[in-house]
Amino acid sequence: IEFNVGIDKLSFFVPNYFVDMTDLALARAVDPAKFHIGIGQDEMAVNPATQDIITFATSAAAQILSDEDKKQVDMVIVATESSVDESKAAAVVVHGLLGIQPFARSIEMKEACYAATAGLVLARDYVTLHQEKKVLVIATDIAKYGLNSGGEPTQGAGAVALLVTANPSILKLNADNVALTQDIYDFWRPTGQAYPSVDGKFSNSVYINAFSQVWDEYCRRYDATFSEFSAIAFHTPYTKMGKKALLPKIESENETIQKHLMDQFEKGIVYNRRVGNLYTGSLYLSLISLLENSELLTAGDKIGLFSYGSGTVAEFFSAQLVPGYEKHLRKAEHEALLNQRVRLSIEAYEAMFESKIDLNHNDSFDDPTLYSISEIKENHRLYRTK
Ligand code: CAA
């Protein structure tokens, strides 16, 4: 059966501060080339304590939702591994801040960096059944490994919002997903632990192996080859990661295909190089980067997406570019968002990193950013809004 359901609008938000990776390398007595080339990161997004996954999510979605959309959104899915509450879903707060019609369903989803993909599949299938409805899927996270930790150069913060509808303007989602679940401890964060436990080298090899397995299974099921893909976007914990997974798999392809996919890969990491890891949002930031920076894409092209969440769940699936998709992108706004950020000194970054909100003391804050925490009142966060 042919369904025409997919991504009608998409956008990202990152907080207003960043660390330059040369500054971080020098402060940590590391060769800057290790961060820029070895890991593939140039800048890293940092957030003040008054901005959290809820303000990122709301900021990302507010840019794309029209008043009409807010009346039609029937479900709000927030994927995160930086939850601010064990019980209440961030989506409930986001739904309220955005002013979405009340008769909607709002939930939070979790499986490390993978959960937004589960949200997207749920949204696709739901809209297929209820074609007049829209579903808002948001991936929002704060990737923090700790000062001076091995993972420090792969931190980041921000959100991606996707509006899923029938007859989408940007990407039609194909129903060809291949998922893989393996119970592995490569990266995990037990309840209450501030930073993740991570076996960095092991996580790299589990990621590479998961891509290999889902790709092979995809080929077995659909008789697919790399030549039918105009590009493949990857979950991007740091930009070198996807390359390390893709290169060994395309070794046996002809040079034209190899070069094309690697050129496209570079377009898919333009924004990620300047943001760092968004966890759940990383794959979708890479997708936006690809769509907004590649000059080799045309309507009808098939794009592969590789989603990976530690723990682990991986998934490979594809989407088709819709005619006129380029008119619905937000390249100028996204570049402006990245360019106007404040570059922090390492001292300022470390102070911001350590600063925390204490839910046990009523307090108010003067972060003027639209969608920021304005107040702590009786053990919960209140948000500044329009
Ligand atoms: N010039 C150029 N390159 C240099 C260099 C220099 N002077 N010095 C080192 N390099 C290269 C190394 O050769 C290496 O390249 P290869 O991986 O291609 O061999 C690269 O820089 C990194 O060097 P190391 O392996 O020595 O780096 P490290 O020990 O500091 O660890 C890391 C890197 C494992 C990514 C670490 O930052 C980390 O643990 N990050 C968090 C975990 C993570 O992101 N894992 C990814 C898979 S898990 C996942 O995808 C889920 C998720 O989002 C977390």
Image: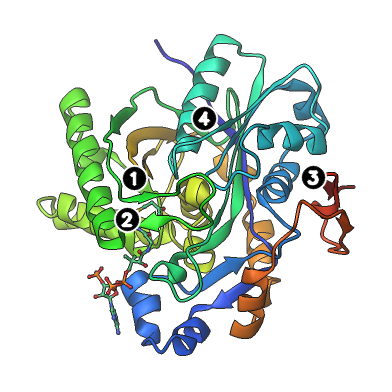
Residue at the spot x=68%, y=32% of the render? Answer: 88
Residue type highlighted by circle 3: Asn
Position of the N terminus by quadrant: top left
User: Picture coordinates of residue 212 (x, y %)?
Assistant: 19, 43
Residue type highlighted by circle 4: Gly
Q: Kindly identify which residue carries mark 3.
A: 379
Question: Which-is-in-front pick, marks 3 and 1?
Answer: 3
Q: Kindly identify which residue carries mark 2.
A: 242
Question: Which-is-in-front pick, marks 3 and 4?
Answer: 3
Q: Of marks 2 and 1, which one's residue comes earlier in the chain? A: 1
Q: Of marks 3 and 2, which one's residue comes earlier in the chain? A: 2
Is ligand 1 closer than 8 angstroms to the Cβ of mark 2? no
- Is 168 on the left or on the right of 198, as rendered? right
Q: Kindly identify which residue carries mark 1.
A: 230
Q: Of marks 4 and 2, which one's residue comes earlier in the chain? A: 4
Describe the element under mark 1 as helix, strand or loop: loop
- Is 358 on the left or on the right of 116, as rendered? right
